[in-house]
Amino acid sequence: MSVPLTVLVQIACVVALVSVGTMLVVVGALGSGLVCLLGSGVWFWRLYRDSEP
């Protein structure tokens, strides 16, 4: 099973967005952190839905 490069790049970006959002929440920037986490969750969900056979 081969995963397309675009999917791998998107997963890497989602992981980076989650880490930035988590860092922002930890340091007290709740608004920006929650926006990053929400955005990464939506992006991951759309990527997951599109990858189903």
Image: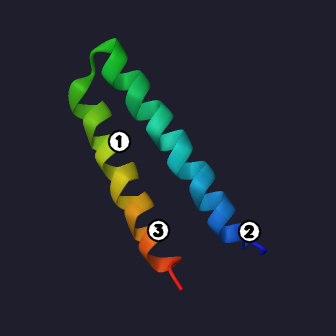
User: Where does residue 27 sit, x and y in percent of width and height?
Assistant: 35, 13
User: Where does residue 43 sit, x and y in percent of width and height?
Assistant: 41, 60
- Three-letter amino acid code at disc 3? Tyr
What SS does tag 1 mark?
A: helix
Q: Residue at x 39, y 33 (%)?
A: 21
Q: Is residue 28 left or right of residue 4?
A: left
Say which label, 3 or 2, has the lower sequence index. 2
Q: Residue at x 57, y 50 (%)?
A: 13
Residue located beneath label 1 in the image? 36
- Three-letter amino acid code at disc 1? Cys
Locate the C terminus by quadrant. bottom right
Tell me the quarter of the picture where residue 32 sits. Answer: top left
Q: Residue at x 36, y 52 (%)?
A: 41
Task: Indicate which disc residue 5 carries.
Answer: 2
Residue that lies at the very extreme toward the bottom in this rendered image: 53
Q: Is residue 43 above or below residue 34?
A: below
User: How far apart, in angstroms, are the residues tagged by discs 3 and 2?
Assistant: 15 Å
Say which label, 1 or 2, has the lower sequence index. 2
User: How far apart, in angstroms, are the residues tagged by discs 1 and 3?
Assistant: 18 Å
Q: How many marks?
A: 3
Say which label, 1 or 3, has the lower sequence index. 1
How crowded pointer 2 is (Cα within 10 Å; few <14, some 14-19, many 20+) is rated as few
Q: Is residue 45 left or right of residue 50?
A: left
How crowded pointer 3 is (Cα within 10 Å; few <14, some 14-19, many 20+) is rated as few
Residue located beneath label 3 in the image? 48
